Amino acid sequence: MIKQRGFTIVELIMVIVILGIISAVAIPRFFDRKTFDERFYFEEVLSSIRYAQKLALASGCSIRIVVDSDGYRLTYAKDCGVGPTYPKINDLVADPSGGGYRGDNEYHVKIDKTFTVTFDSLGAASPSDSVEFASGSFKLAVHSTGFIEVTQ
C-alpha cells in the first residue's frame, strides 16, 4: 500500500477561514490613510520650519512662520533692505515655483493652537513655542536657541 501525504480538505478550509479572519481584522489597520496623512502634514510643517530657519541664516532677514488650523505660511518679519524690490514686512517668502511659501491643511489635521515663531539672522527663535498635531500624536517645539525638538 502506498502511503499518501497531504492535507485534508478540512485542514485546508480551516486555514482559509483563519486567513480570512486575520485579513479582515488586520489589513484595514495597515491601510488607514488618516495616520499617513497626519504624519505627512506634520513632516511638511517641520520641513517648512527648518527651511525658515535656514533662510533666516542665509539671507540675514528675520523670517516668521505661522502654523494654524488652515495651514502654514512663511513671511518676512521685518523689512529686508531699502530698495523697492526688497521684501517688506509681512510679504510671503517666495517658494521655488515663484509663488508664496505656504501650505494648506488639506487633510484637516487637528492642531492644538496657533504656532508662531520668528527666526533671526543667527537662527535663534523668538518666542520659543510648541504645538501638537493630531491630538498629541506628534509634538514640535522650537526653543529660543533655535533648536527644533520633535517628539512622537
Image: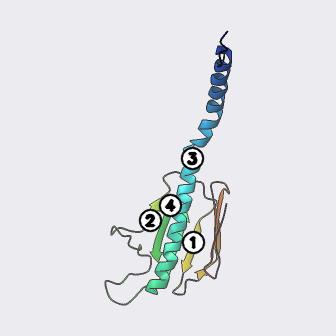
State the residue at coordinates (50%, 69%): 48
Q: Position of residue 110 (x, y in %)?
A: 60, 54
Q: In the rendered structure, which disc, 1 or 4, sits on the residue that comes first in sequence?
A: 4
State the residue at coordinates (56%, 41%): 31
Query: Which kind of residue does numbered mark 4 sit on?
Result: Gly
Q: Which residue carries the number 2 mark?
A: 102
Direction bottom: furthest residue: 82
Q: Which residue carries the number 4 mark?
A: 71
51 left or right, relative to 150:
left
Q: Residues within 10 Å of mark 2 (few under 14, many from 20)?
A: some
Q: Name the image quarter holding residue 85.
A: bottom left
Q: Quadrant of the N terminus?
A: top right
Q: Position of residue 137 (x, y in %)?
A: 66, 56
Image height of 9 relative to 148, above or below:
above
Query: Which kind of residue does numbered mark 1 sit on?
Result: Thr
Q: Quadrant of the C terminus?
A: bottom right
Query: Which kind of residue does numbered mark 2 sit on?
Result: Arg
Q: Cα distance, mark 4 to mark 3?
A: 17 Å
Q: Name the image quarter holding residue 88.
A: bottom left
Q: Tell me if I can see residue 33 in this picture.
A: yes
Q: Cα distance, mark 3 to mark 1?
A: 25 Å
Q: Position of residue 12 (x, y in %)?
A: 64, 20
Q: Which residue carries the number 3 mark?
A: 34
Q: Name the image quarter holding residue 98.
A: bottom left
The residue lying toward the viewer, choosing from 22 and 134, is: 22
9 left or right, relative to 53:
right
State the residue at coordinates (54%, 45%): 33
